[in-house]
Image (cartoon, grey):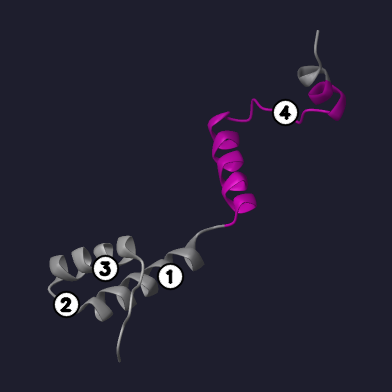
Amino acid sequence: MDLRISNPRARELAFQLAARRKVSMTRAVIDALENELVREQEQASLAGRLAAIADDLGSKAGGLGRAVSKDEIDEMWSNP
């Protein structure tokens, strides 16, 4: 398979990665793209990450936390 990279920056990055790994530029590009796709698939959604943060903070509160009403939230964000 012939790999043609017309963008100079992309070509240089592919060359550097190939040189470090001692593989062809084609192999370096394929590996990099496969790794990036795996990373994207494994990354939790924003909602999932926020839920994990909220759960963590809730557990650290030791049961001292409480639900905040919409009126309280609105009051916190209102301009005095």
Which comes sooner in the sequence, label 3 or label 2?
3
Q: Residue at x 31, y 60 (%)?
A: 9
Residue depicted at x 56% and y 34%? 57
Query: Mark 1: which amino acid?
Result: Val
The stretch of residues the image draws in magenta is 45-74
Q: Which residue is mark 2?
A: 23
Under circle 4, the secondary element is: loop
Q: Give the quarter of the figure containing the N terminus.
A: bottom left
Whole-percent x and y of residue 80?
81, 7
Query: Which one is earlier in the sequence, the residue at label 3 or at label 1?
Result: 3
- Say what amino acid the circle numbered 4 marks: Arg
Across and down, in percent, residue 5 comes to: 33, 74
- Residue 14 numbered tag: 3
Sequence-first tag of 1 and 4 = 1
* Element type at mark 1: helix
Looking at the image, tell me whether mark 3 or mark 4 is earlier in sequence order.
3
